[in-house]
Image: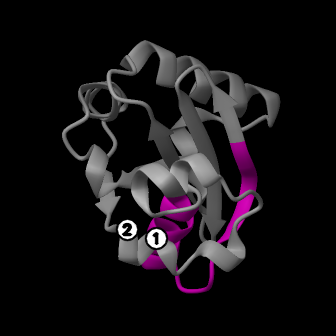
Amino acid sequence: MSAEPILVIGLGCQRGCPASTLRALLDQTLLAHGIELHRVRALASIDLKRDEPGLLELAGQLALPLTCFSVEQLASYEQRLSHRSEIAFERTGCYGIAESAALALADQLGRSPATLLITRQKGPKSTLALAVVA
């Protein structure tokens, strides 16, 4: 019997984005794809957001660890993104925070390269992606 796949949510958000906004995007996305919240193992973002209150509050509500990656770590994922955001690049030096962070953390947790199960979803002031790894 194979182990459960590891599901990781990558999140990007504008400063001051409330946890409720992030949670709504998360719930809508998982519901649309038939994925239960309890299957999500961890949250990921960019280290510029490590003190972002909404992200920290969401991680607390969900009792999930939040791992933040440097721009350099995320930049190495550019070729694997479904979408490159010039705005994200201008602001952070990274073309896609949600997708890159999800892939980076899933790669770290898993034994094989991660793939995007859900590509970048956009909500108010927020983005989300879901990566999976065996």
In the rendered image, residue 113 lying in the magenta stretch gets the answer yes
| 103, 52: nearer the viewer | 52
- What amino acid is labelled 1 in the image? Leu
SS at mark 1? helix
Q: Is residue 32 above or below residue 87?
A: above
Q: Quadrant of the rendered structure where residue 63 is? A: top left
Residue lying at the far bottom of the rendered structure: 112
> In percent of the image, x 37 and y 17: which residue is there?
18
Identify the residue position indicated by label 1 in the image: 74
Q: Quadrant of the rendered structure where residue 32 is? A: top right
Q: Quadrant of the C terminus?
A: bottom right
Residue lying at the far left of the rendered structure: 51
> In percent of the image, x 40 and y 76: which residue is there?
73
**Residue span colored magenta:** 100-120
The answer to whether marks 2 and 1 mark residues whose Cβ atoms lie closer than 8 Å is yes
Q: Is residue 94 above or below residue 72?
A: above
- Dot 2 alpha-carbon crowd within 10 angstroms: few under 14, some 14 to 19, many 20 or more: some
Compared across the picture, whether 78 is left or right of 59 comes to right
Measured in 3D between alpha carbons, the distance from the residue under mark 2 to the one under mark 1, in whole angstroms, is 5 Å
Identify the residue position indicated by label 2 in the image: 71
